[in-house]
Image (cartoon, rainbow, N blue to C red):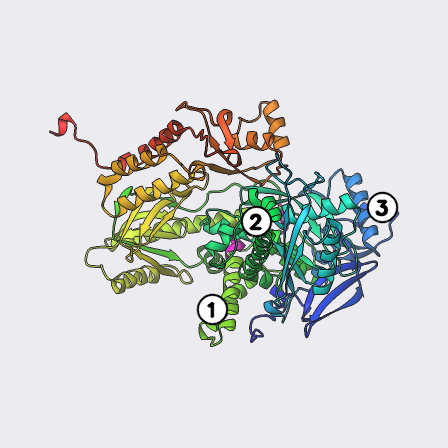
């Protein structure tokens, strides 16, 4: 793979150019590096002194743990690096400093800097990163999926019930091997032993599964504990280290999960990868394996499907079907990992984190690590973390037009904020070594190089590699602005971030004025782009492209405007909520107000159908559309899934109950369902429910029912309630619908 023109910048890829490192682990007073070479794995141990950064070495006066002191150059806050003989000594010093200062290491104003991940510390200090010069296809991966029994009378499997045993374990490795460990031929302890053997036989670098942390691994661990069985999955024969209540924050979500760490291996949950993918696009109807596999086109036509409630019966009556279903799950999981895991594999070559940890670290945290790595290499002091929650005005948004308009042209500034930072030399004041802008410029140069190499590639594998790489660089480039405005990081600078957004608003307003001078009319503005109706006589793509080119030429050097799309029509609803009709007929809907996953499916479908009628000039048929939906809601055999609402729990049910008791929050239907269930729910779990009863104004939390409890023979869906909700949605669009004539119009 011709990557040498890209991957040898030490600012971005670290100064250790060793190839094939697949894992970094502790080994007593040493660090153990695992390498994959020519299909084989070997390891190498080397000494390492873990460290804590402090402002004054006198802070550890009185601590009985010996340490060496490395004085760092410069006047920044953390001027000393305390070096310890072992990780245990480092942890003891951390506890001493916490007690002495009254500040835990996680406090943003702690006068010491402790990094709780030993492998991260090593990679920072050494410049080592994973997977250099290793192909993604060379990584040995093992997809794992289990099926479990459920006792009669219960809706969910529970590992604490003796009869709810594991009945099938399917495994598929990335080199073609497949196996199903069958519960009709083995006892549960025998299944677990066979799983141990299979893992050591395959010797995977990565174990993957869909929702593997919160179901498969958790279930396996509890059943193994029940039998007193040891899971020796580590490359050194050790058992997994389990953190029962790990938390992962992603955008507005918090996911609680039992984290597993397996020595010398990485665990990658494709459910997490799907969440990360969907943060930006928000185009997935569900994050479940089956729905996601269909979305990405990796579901085989002949794959076997089973409902969760039918698993136990299939095991008793048709075990071959169950085992086929189990194996198909691993096939889809491995396909998802290959698709969604690739960008994170590439980022592991850049950031000093394990593959497993890199996936769950935020962009700002990972960018901060690049600065820490280089500052430590140069022996330079490191500034204190930015404290307080930054507040400043964001990007410019505006919706001067509402309703249906067309034709529409979309232009935007290529990487607006990074371009402004480079054009106006905007960098954090705390970056004494001046790394910020060179790093950003290199990333942009590398991205352009990768894009060109992708275009020039003859082989599909090379094209895929360079295209994925340029997308990774694009994400990192755009994350530099977010890093500037973040708190709790060493080199962030909210004042500079505020200046970037100010210049962004100036740039966009300037573009609006330039478009107006050309006779164009602005319809929607969103931070770095403008939707507008072109002037008369500018109806061809060439003319529109020339118009955008003229706008770009009148902006400061380094700020480039591109034509990003052309559309037959646009429905402008409100700021950041609109729909577009392409010339080929496809309709694109943007904004949570028009496509929120928090709405019931029938309401999302109704809005999509209504918007399509608006965009295609059929607004007069909306009333008829409403009546059609009412007929469907009143029909016998109404599918409960069509009206069910799915919500994600943003905290644990126990926390909800306590806040409710203290009067700190309102009742929630989803939490009431979770509390009444025989399943143990965590923050981040999904709950699907419908509303029963007959009252049109029913209170959802009082009349909610779990979807799994719906009985089609005795349906109790509150049709009047759902018709009323449909009516409320239609009323939101009344200003855009034909109005009935009044006496004053006659």
Q: Nearer the viewer, residue 480 or 719?
A: 719
Looking at the rendering, in which quadrant would you find the C terminus?
top left
Q: Secondary structure at mark 2?
A: loop
Q: Secondary structure at mark 3?
A: loop
Magenta stretch: includes residue 104? no
Q: Is residue 75 left or right of residue 255?
A: right
Region in magenta: 478-491
Work out whether 455 lies above or below 249: below
- Rounded to the nearest angstrom, the CA distance separating label 1 from label 3 is 54 Å
Judging by the rendered image, the residue that carries numbered circle 2 is 493
Disc 2 packing (10 Å; few <14; some 14–19; many ≥20): many
Magenta stretch: includes residue 480? yes
- Rounded to the nearest angstrom, the CA distance separating label 2 from label 3 is 33 Å
Q: Nearer the viewer, residue 617 or 392?
A: 617
- Rounded to the nearest angstrom, the CA distance separating label 2 from label 1 is 31 Å
Furthest residue toward right: 64
Give residue 70's quadrant in the image: bottom right
Give residue 671's quadrant in the image: top right
Q: Which mark is residue 61?
A: 3
Looking at the rendering, in which quadrant would you find the N terminus?
bottom right
Give coordinates of residue 580: x percent, y percent.
32, 50
Judging by the rendered image, the residue that carries numbered circle 1 is 451
Are the residues at dot 2 and dot 3 in contact (C-beta closer than 8 Å)? no
Are the residues at dot 2 and dot 1 in contact (C-beta closer than 8 Å)? no
Q: Nearer the viewer, residue 225 or 589?
A: 225
């Amino acid at each position: 793979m011709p990557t040498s023109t890209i991957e040898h910048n030490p600012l971005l890829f670290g100064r250790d150019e060793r190839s094939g490192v697949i894992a970094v682990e502790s080994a007593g007073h040493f660090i153990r590096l695992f390498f994959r070479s020519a299909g084989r794995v070997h390891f190498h141990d080397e000494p390492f002194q873990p460290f804590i950064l402090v402002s004054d070495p006198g802070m550890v006066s009185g601590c009985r743990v010996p340490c060496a002191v490395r004085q760092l150059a410069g006047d920044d806050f953390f001027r000393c690096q305390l070096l310890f003989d072992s990780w245990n000594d480092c942890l003891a010093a951390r506890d001493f400093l916490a007690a002495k200062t009254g500040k835990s290491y996680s406090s943003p104003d702690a006068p010491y800097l402790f990094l709780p991940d030993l492998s991260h510390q090593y990679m920072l200090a050494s410049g080592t990163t994973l997977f250099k010069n290793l192909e993604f296809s060379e990584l040995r991966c093992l997809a794992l999926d289990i099926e479990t029994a459920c006792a009669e009378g219960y809706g969910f499997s529970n590992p604490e019930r003796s009869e709810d045993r594991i009945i099938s374990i399917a495994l598929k490795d990335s080199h073609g091997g497949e196996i199903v460990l069958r519960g009709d031929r083995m006892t549960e302890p025998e299944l677990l032993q066979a799983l141990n053997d299979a893992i050591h036989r395959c010797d995977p670098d990565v174990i993957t599964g869909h929702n593997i942390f919160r179901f498969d691994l958790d279930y396996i661990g509890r059943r193994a504990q029940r039998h007193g069985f040891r899971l020796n999955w580590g490359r050194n024969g050790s058992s997994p280290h389990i953190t029962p209540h790990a938390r992962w924050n992603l955008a507005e979500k918090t996911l609680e999960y039992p984290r597993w760490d397996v020595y010398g291996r990485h665990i990658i949950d494709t459910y997490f990868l799907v969440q990360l993918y969907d943060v930006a696009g928000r185009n997935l109807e569900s994050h479940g394996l089956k729905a996601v596999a269909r979305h990405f086109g990796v579901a085989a036509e002949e794959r076997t499907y089973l409902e969760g409630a039918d698993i136990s019966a299939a095991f008793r009556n048709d075990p071959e079907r169950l085992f086929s279903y189990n194996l198909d799950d691993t096939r889809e999981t491995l396909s998802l990992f290959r698709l969604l895991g690739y960008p994170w594999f590439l980022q592991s070559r850049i950031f000093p984190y394990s593959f497993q940890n890199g996936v769950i670290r935020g962009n700002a945290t990972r960018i901060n690590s690049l600065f820490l790595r280089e500052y430590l290499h140069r022996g330079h002091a490191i500034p204190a973390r930015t404290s307080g929650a930054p507040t400043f005005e964001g990007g410019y948004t505006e919706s001067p037009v509402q309703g249906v308009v067309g034709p529409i042209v979309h232009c935007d500034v290529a990487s607006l904020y990074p371009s402004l930072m480079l054009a106006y030399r905007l960098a954090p004041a705390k970056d004494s070594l001046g790394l910020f802008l060179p790093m950003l410029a290199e990333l942009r140069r590398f991205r352009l190089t990768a894009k060109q190499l992708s275009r020039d590639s003859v082989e599909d594998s090379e094209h895929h590699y360079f295209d994925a790489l340029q997308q990774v660089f694009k994400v990192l480039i755009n994350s530099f602005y977010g890093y500037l405005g973040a708190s709790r990081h060493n080199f962030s600078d909210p004042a500079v971030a505020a200046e970037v957004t100010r210049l962004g608003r100036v740039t966009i307003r300037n573009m609006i004025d330039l478009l107006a001078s050309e006779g164009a009319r602005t319809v929607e503005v969103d931070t770095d782009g403008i939707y507008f109706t072109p002037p008369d006589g500018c109806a061809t793509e060439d003319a529109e492209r020339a118009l955008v080119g003229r706008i770009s030429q009148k902006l400061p050097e380094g700020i480039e405007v591109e034509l990003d799309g052309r559309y037959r029509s646009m429905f402008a609803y409100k700021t950041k909520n609109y729909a577009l009709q392409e010339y080929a007929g496809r309709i694109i809907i943007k904004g949570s107000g028009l496509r929120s996953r928090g709405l019931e499916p029938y309401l999302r479908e109704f809005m999509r159908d209504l918007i399509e009628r608006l965009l295609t000039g059929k607004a007069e048929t909306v009333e008829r559309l409403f009546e059609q939906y009412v007929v469907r809601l009143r029909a016998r055999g109404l599918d409960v899934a069509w009206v069910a609402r799915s919500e994600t729990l943003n905290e644990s049910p126990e926390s909800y109950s306590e806040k409710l008791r203290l009067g700190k929050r309102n009742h929630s239907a989803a939490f009431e369902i979770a509390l009444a269930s025989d399943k143990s729910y965590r923050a981040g779990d999904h709950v699907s429910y419908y509303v029963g009863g007959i009252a049109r104004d029913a209170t959802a939390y009082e009349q909610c029912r779990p979807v799994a409890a719906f009985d089609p023979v005795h349906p109790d869906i509150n049709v009047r309630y759902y018709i009323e909700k449909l009516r409320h949605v239609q009323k939101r669009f009344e200003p855009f619908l034909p109005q009935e004539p009044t006496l004053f119009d006659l």
